[in-house]
Amino acid sequence: MLHVHLGAEAKWRAFDEPLTPAAGAVLHDARTSPRDARTAALGEAASPLLAELARDGRTGVVDLARATGWSKARVSARLEELLDGQALRLAVDLAYARFGFHTTAYLWLTVSPGRLRETGDTLSRHPETTFAAAVTGSAGLLVTVTCRTMDDLYTYVTDRIGVLPAVTLVDVVPVLHRLKQAGTRLHQGRLTPT
């Protein structure tokens, strides 16, 4: 991988009702607020809680309270402090099929070298794109896309990618069965603990 094209704040924006600009600003402000000196102390004081979250980050407050021996109120307060102090960060992984997106594919695009950056940036802003990167080899760009159906993928390749002037060849590699994505395993279309 030579370069990752980020495109926008969101990694994948295919939902029909994305976050409003105000909701996105709240998330962005929380993520970029300056860390204070309390962050390290927060992490140390919450080590039993953090150990449970490391085991399964989806564990609910009731189970966290049971595992740590703390009250639910204490767990909730500590989680809020950890998130506010950025000692704890959230990452969301989605089972796309549960939202009606059943077709994922890797697209290997041959692009003229002088237009690689422009094309990668353009593709990274498409709602279907989950990942875009300049790579070594004869195909200069690797793009991962997620669409609702195979017909939508076909339309995307022909009508959105096919019209880009710098793209001379597209190899479409559909994902027939996904076992793992990002940091989560999938079993029968559902996210499962690793």
Image: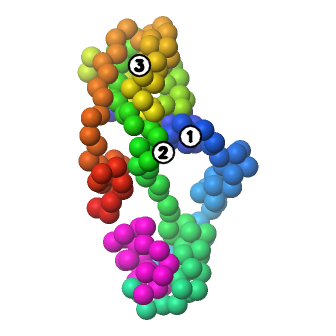
The CA distance from mark 2 to mark 3 is 20 Å
Task: Specify start and end residues of the magenta stretch as a single range.
Answer: 45-66
The CA distance from mark 1 to mark 3 is 19 Å
Image quadrant occupied by the N terminus: top left
For residue 52, above or below residue 91: below
The residue located at (59%, 74%) in the rendering is 80
Tell me if I can see residue 114 in this picture.
no
Badge 2 amino acid: Phe
Q: Nearer the viewer, residue 94 or 152?
A: 152
Residue 74 horizontal/vertical position (percent): 56, 86
The residue located at (54%, 86%) in the rendering is 72
The CA distance from mark 2 to mark 1 is 8 Å
Residue 82 horizontal/vertical position (percent): 54, 73
Q: Which mark is residue 154?
A: 3
- Quarter location, residue 171: top left
Mark 1 element type: loop
Residue 14 horizontal/vertical position (percent): 54, 36
The residue to which callout 1 is attached is 15
The residue to which callout 2 is attached is 99
